[in-house]
Image (spheres, grey):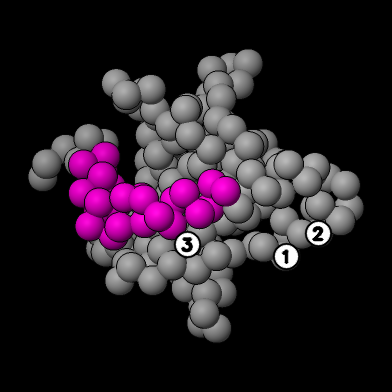
Amino acid sequence: MRKKSILGNYVIHPDVKYTHQIKKLEEGAYAALITFLPETQELYEQESGRDICLASAGYKWLMYLPLDECWCLSAYYTSDAELIGWYFDISKGNFLDEEGIPCTDDIFLDLAISADGQAMTLDADELQDALDNHEILIDDYHHAYKVHDQIMNSKWRDPRFLTKLSEGLLTGFLGSN
């Protein structure tokens, strides 16, 4: 498992520069907005055989981390505020670290949902490798798939619900301009 902070250690790369804001929400969750600065080098990920730009000058990442769930949701936006998609980091649990920063114990398995609603399970090979290398227990392995299946069979899989949530959170950070 890997501890990940909502502050953006998702982007550990010297050429990626950003600012961030964190908000505590009323319902026992936290949200963060990461905005990439002009000097940021573009960051690409492969998805379905094509390169997708996830970070560039002006791009925004919106994170939503509920403390009572076992996932962290990210929404990715271009500099023109066009939604790229959503990404669930499945975790063993979410918590506040010793400095009060919201974090997650990432458990390797991930779920991406494109702006048009297509779902893709990611990093199942990393989860299997972690089990084979005794980095996680069999219970952790099964937990990851249980959380994955719960997301896939709930409102969290619905792009309309995710859009409404993401837009509401983004408006909370940026205002209604």
Of all residues, the one furthest to the bottom in this rendering is 49
Q: Is residue 152 magenta?
A: yes
Task: Estimate how packed mark 1 is, as few (under 14), some (14 to 19) or many (20 or more) residues with alpha carbons within 10 Å.
Answer: few
Nearer-the-camera pick, 176 or 89: 89
Mark 2 sits on what residue?
129
107 left or right of 158 in image: right
Nearer-the-camera pick, 123 or 50: 123
Q: How many marks?
A: 3
Q: Quadrant of residue 82?
A: bottom left
Numbered badge on residue 125? 1
Q: Is residue 91 visible?
A: yes
Q: Residues within 10 Å of mark 3 (few under 14, many from 20)?
A: many
Q: Of helix, strand and loop, which one carries label 2?
A: helix
Residue on which disc 3 sits: 112
Q: What's the residue type where badge 1 is placed?
A: Asp
Q: Is residue 57 above or below residue 19?
A: below
* CA–CA distance in space, label 3 to label 1: 15 Å
Magenta region: which residues? Answer: 146-170
Q: CA distance from mark 3 to mark 2?
A: 20 Å
